[in-house]
Image: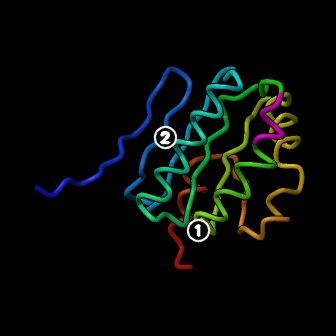
């Protein structure tokens, strides 16, 4: 008997990690305060989905984030950015938080990591613009 491995979308109260068929990307939406251990679990699910579906694009919606838990900015810098690059991601569209504190948290977490990892990263104020950019021919 042949077993086929599948991977499910992740949907929790404050995180949604799904395959976006329209943009052929991993679509992640985060909101509220996410404790460090939960964030670790979320990003590991992201890695699994990127690998399983062989994705080269991510759409990360951070509009609902106001502040990151202690340790999360370092996790994003030292684990998330290098690993998505290693898994083959070449394009990342971030939808930025409207909240000033959310923007500050995001900036601290990204802190030049996108440039160091040589990934094509763009920041957007809305989901529609981010999706349009991801759907452009590479």
Category of crowding for the residue at label 2, using alpha-carbon neighbours closer than 10 angstroms: few (below 14), some (14–19), many (at least 20): many
**Which residue corresponds to the image point at 35% horizontal and 41% vertical from the top-left?**
8
Front residue of 40/113: it is 40
Residue at the image point whose x is 88% and y is 56% from the top: 112
The N terminus lies in quadrant: bottom left
Q: Main secondary structure of the magenta part?
A: helix
Question: What residue sits 78% from the left and 24% below the top?
Answer: 69
Disc ID at residue 124: none
Residue shown at 39%/58% (left/top)? 22
- Badge count: 2
Residue neighbourhood size for the residue with mark 1, other residues' Cα within 10 Å, grouped as few (<14), some (14–19), many (≥20): some
Name the residue furthest front: 1
Snapshot colouring? rainbow
Magenta stretch? 71-75
Q: Position of residue 28 (x, y in %)?
A: 55, 43
Q: Nearer the viewer, residue 136 or 78?
A: 78
Q: Depth-wise, is mark 1 or mark 2 nearer the camera?
A: 1
Question: Vertically, is 84 above or below 107?
Answer: below
Given contact means CB atoms under 8 Å apart, are the residues at marks 1 and 2 in contact? no
Q: Secondary structure at mark 1?
A: loop
Location of mark 1 (residue): 88
Left or right for 80, reference 103: left
Q: Residue furthest bottom?
A: 138
Q: Which residue has dot 2 on it?
A: 17
Q: Is residue 42 magenta?
A: no
Residue 34 vs residue 94, the one in the foreground: 34
Q: What is the CA distance from the residue labelled 1 to the residue labelled 2? A: 18 Å
* Residue 74 image point, x, y percent: 83, 40
Q: Earlier in the sequence, mark 1 or mark 2?
A: 2
Is 54 placed left or right of 35 in the picture? left
Residue 21 in percent (x, y) is at: 37, 57
Q: Quadrant of residue 120?
A: bottom right
């Amino acid at each position: 008997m042949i077993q086929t491995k599948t991977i499910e979308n992740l949907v929790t109260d404050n995180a949604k990690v799904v395959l976006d068929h329209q943009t052929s990307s991993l679509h992640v939406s985060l909101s509220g305060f996410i404790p460090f251990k939960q964030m670790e679990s979320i990003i590991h699910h992201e890695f699994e989905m990127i690998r399983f579906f062989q994705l080269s694009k991510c759409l990360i919606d951070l509009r609902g984030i106001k502040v990151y838990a202690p340790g999360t900015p370092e996790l994003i810098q030292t684990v998330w950015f290098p690993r998505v690059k290693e898994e083959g991601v070449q394009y990342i569209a971030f939808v930025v938080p409207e909240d000033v504190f959310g923007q500050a948290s995001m900036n601290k977490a990204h802190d030049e990591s996108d440039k160091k990892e040589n990934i094509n990263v763009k920041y957007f104020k809305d989901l529609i613009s981010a999706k349009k950019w991801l759907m452009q021919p590479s």
